[in-house]
Every structure is written in C-alpha cells, then in structure tokens.
Amino acid sequence: MSNWQQVSLGDLETPVGRKVAVPPQGSRASMSDGYPLRPLGEVMRLDIQRTPMKPATTYRLAGVLNAGKGVVAKGELRGGDTEYAAMNVLRVDQVVMRKLTAWEGPIAVVPAEFDGFVVSNEFPTFTLGSELVPDWVRHVCRSPRLWAEMKNRVSGTVQRRKRLNPEQLLQIQLPIPPREVQARIVEMLDAVDDQIAALEAEVDAIVRVRTGMVGRSADTEQTPLGILGVVSQGKGLPKEFQGKRTGAVSWYKIADMTGPGNEFGYTLADTRLPLSEVAENGGVVVDAGAVTFPRVGGAVLTEKKRIVDTPGALDENHLIITPGEGTNSEYLLAVMESFALSELVRPGAVPSLNMGLIRSTKVPWSWTENQSFGTALGALRAEARALAAEAASLRAARAALLSGLLDRTIDIKSAKLEV
C-alpha cells in the first residue's frame, strides 16, 4: 500500500468526512488483481411483464432519462386513450432502458417508488441475478463507459432513429466484482452523491432567497419593463460560423444557456469569433449587465433567464433588456426570475414572445432600493455560481472514480473508507 495515496473525496469531502484511498495518477491495478469481464447476459436476463390497456383503467406512465439519470414520471394515462393494446410494467430493482437513441445512455435501475408504472414496448426490462447489487448497477448505469458500449452496438441508418436491442445490451461486457466489493463501491459513490445533493440544495435555497427579495421595498410599484431599459432582439448567427472558435468574442446561442459556466450568467459561447468578423456578419455585441431570455419555441417554457457577464453577440432567438439609468442589472435579473415567461406567450403552436409584449409587461420595481438590493443579489448569484462549480467538480471527480473502479485502474480491494 506504500504506493497509494490518501485523498479526500472533493477534494472529495463528504458530509460524514469519509475518505477514499486511490492510486496515484497513472498507476494501474494488475490484471491479476482485476475482476473478470463478463457479458451482462450472464448476470441479468430479459424479463418483460405485459399488462393489457383496459379502457376504464388509469395507469401511471414512466420514462427513462438520458445519461443514466434515472426514471421519470410522465403523468397518468387512461387505457382507452392510447393506441397500445398492452404496455410493459416496471418492477423495483429491474433495469429498464430505452431502445430508441440508446447511444444517449437512457438506462436506469427502477426505484421502489416507480414499481408498477408502465412504459411502452420501446422500454425492455431486465431482472438482475443474485451476483449483482442493484445500487451498484444504478451507479454503473451512470457510467460513460456503459453508454459508449451501448453506442457501439446500436443499429440503424438514421442517427436519431438508431436502436439498441435487448440482446445487444446483454452482449456488453463489464468487470463484475464480488457483491461485497460492489457494496463498498456503492458506499463510496453514495457519499459523493450526498455531498453533490447538499451543494445543489444550497444553490436552490439561494435562488429562492434571490427571488424572495423582489417586491420587499415599501415603494415597490408595478413598472413596465420598457421603462427599465432598452428591449431588443439578437441577430442571427450565420450557420457556416456556428461552432467556430477563431476569435475572442462569444456569439451566444440559446443552447449556451446550459453550457458549462453559463448556468448563472453568460460567460462563454460555443462560437467565438474575431470582433471584426462579428461585425461583418451583423452581430451586435451586448454589454455586460444586460438580461436575456429565449424569444421563441420550447426554450421559452424552460424559464431560463441569464445576465450577460462577458460581453458578446446574441443570436436572434434571444430577447434582451439592456438596463437604463438607475436600473440595477442584478435586481432586474431577479425580477425576471420571479415570474414565468410562459404566462406571456402568444397562443398558438409555437410559444413566442415579442419586444412589444415585453416592453409593456409590468413587474414589481423599487427605484429607491433596487441598487442596494442589487449589490446583495449579485453576491448571492456569485455564491450560487461557486457552489454549482464545486458540485460540477465533484461530479467530474465522481465520474473519474467510477471509471477507475470499472476499468480497474483503481483497485477497490485496496481502497478503504475512513470515518
């Protein structure tokens, strides 16, 4: 054990102070110390229970999230309202996957609260053998290694329609450690997940505090957004420039709202061009402090609002409010976060907002205290961003730990937990 180092899990710091011993960078457990690669078909089996769709019966419908993120409820369904004659039933501790777009990792272990839910025949289910700990399989379902193996086996010619059949999943080979080792892996990874959940809960609490500060001032009045700043629309990013990184100026697309580091404010776009090229193609650089949100499509319903932290151009799917004199941008962002844009959308097939509607929309505003409140709100946003970055770092460390445990660069026999 002299060539192993003791590291904290977050450093990998966990709620109960656990630590895990991992090998130094670049070391590798010997193949003789590793676990044999075995096809999944040896340790679990296809096991589908079908239930007929009775017209007068209500069923609870489920789906499976990508990247092994779990099972999700999709509402209730009356048997008479579906074209399916029968559907698959989920049972606790089974594995369920989505055959369609399986290369995105839609695979999970069924938790107890989803026992009895139904899914279409697009979702085959598998019963685990006695050699597998269900919670260990739950973590394996979140492994990029498994998703890569699934992607390598999908069949079909059109990318979005490619499928993975149950037989192909069962052909995937993974190292299967003994049950007692699986249990130790679960304990380690659950400890990291607990810390990630604690950080995310803190972020959620800060968001609630931010929006709760809106409307607290005695002089709060309903003020049209058009009075608080200039409302404008972004400019189209030519398709041939999308994704290029030839300069320092970001040209933000709506997809950048969920990009790394952009969850609490625009800092960096996937597309970055020289300033001269942005100008030549009609882009308009938006100053730091502007508040932006989606203008059209399903993105409007996601209720994402962002402040521009790093100046850049925004594409035509953004609406922008550039704060006027006396308008604090942090307070303006909190005001926008305090209500649902979906309540303003035009009726019709495609949700949409327009500049006139936004200009006339009245929001709670304090002219005397928006500046002082804005300072506090800015500090809270910075704290939320720091906590979210810490959670992201922990998720990356967790993924590396899981990967090492699966490919045996980390030998769980030599790893140990300390309280």
Image: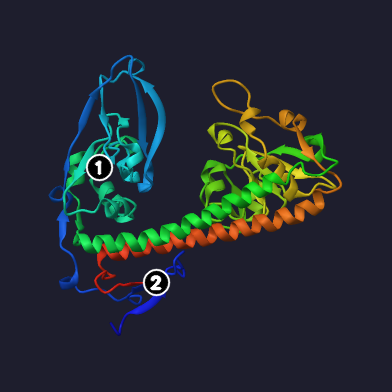
Q: Residue at x 61, y 42 (%)?
A: 315
Residue nearest the viewer, comparing 261 with 85: 85
Q: Which kind of residue does numbered mark 1 sit on?
A: Gln
Hey, which quadrant is residue 218 in on the image?
A: top right
Indicate the position of residue 91 as horizontal and vertical percent values: 26, 37
Disc 2 element: loop
Residue nearest the viewer, comparing 67 with 161: 67
Above/below status of 378 relative to 318: below
Image quadrant in which the C terminus is located: bottom left
Residue 404 visible to an observer of this rendering: yes
Image quadrant in which the N terminus is located: bottom left
The residue that label 1 is drawn on is 94
Indicate the position of residue 312 as horizontal and vertical percent values: 66, 51
Using residue 141 as the reference point, say whether residue 301 is left or right of it: right
Using residue 394 as the reference point, say whether residue 207 is left or right of it: right
Q: Residue at x 28, y 41 (%)?
A: 92
The residue that label 2 is drawn on is 419
